[in-house]
Amino acid sequence: MRPRSGFDWLRVSWGAPEEPPAEACSYCDALLDVDAGVPLILWNADGWCAQFCDDCQRIWWGLEDAPSVPSIGITFAASDDPTGRIQPSLGSCCICQAETGARTIVMLPVKCVIPGHGWGCFVCGLPMDGASAVVCDVCAAGLGAGTQALRFACSGFPGTDGRVPIETLTVPHEHDPAVEH
């Protein structure tokens, strides 16, 4: 995945490894509304991370909302948030197995166990069979820094379909290289 022409990597404000996630877009400084959506998060080889708001995702990365996507099996549960907000539950962390707090989704280049319960691509027609993993904030920092590795992957939908050992997923699930993304 590459940004569109005109994107300026020098404008990206990278967050240090193991630093709490920023509350603003790393490109345009717009405040991120985590209740309205999930920012695009990238890590560089040194573990520094950048996250992009919905507008930058659309303008620079070509990502669009897909309102017709069927349910992806995310459940909602009360959180420890003092405001009492209801938070999505993605199930247990695929590294430390913590039952709460997983909020980073990692798309894997292999098929998940349950066909149709994964990620896909509307651009190249890749079916919704891609495996994913979810990790808590602490493990996400370690994963981005290369100090931790995934131990499990989601069998299908993160919040409802359980986990499998990461090494059991071996069938490739990759974008069509002939289609520009």
Image (cartoon, helix red, strand yellow):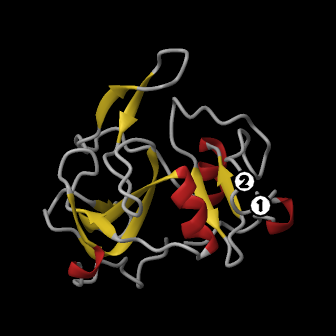
Q: Relative to 178, is 155 above or below?
A: above
Could you say which disc has been placed on residue 172 in the image?
A: none
Q: Nearer the viewer, residue 116 or 105?
A: 105
Image location (x, y in percent) of residue 44: 68, 73
Q: Is residue 12 left or right of residue 64?
A: right
In the displayed image of the protein, which residue is found farthest to the left?
Answer: 114
Q: Secondary structure at mark 2?
A: loop
Image point (43%, 62%), residue name = 106
Q: Is residue 52 left or right of residue 155?
A: right
Q: Relative to 47, is 75 above or below?
A: above
The part of the image, by quadrant, that contains residue 68 is: top left
Image point (64%, 44%), residue name = 53
Q: Amino acid at mark 2?
A: Glu
Q: Amino acid at mark 1?
A: Ala
Q: Is residue 157 left or right of residue 46?
A: left
Image point (15%, 68%), residue name = 113
> Pointer 2 and pointer 1: residues touching (CB < 8 Å)?
yes
Q: Nearer the viewer, residue 75 or 143?
A: 143
Residue receiving disc 2: 19
Image point (27%, 81%), residue name = 167
* CA distance for labels 2 and 1: 6 Å
Q: Secondary structure at mark 1?
A: loop
The part of the image, by quadrant, that contains residue 135 is: bottom left
Q: Relative to 8, is 102 above or below?
A: above
Could you say which disc has been placed on residue 16 in the image?
A: 1
In the displayed image of the protein, which residue is found farthest to the right?
Answer: 10
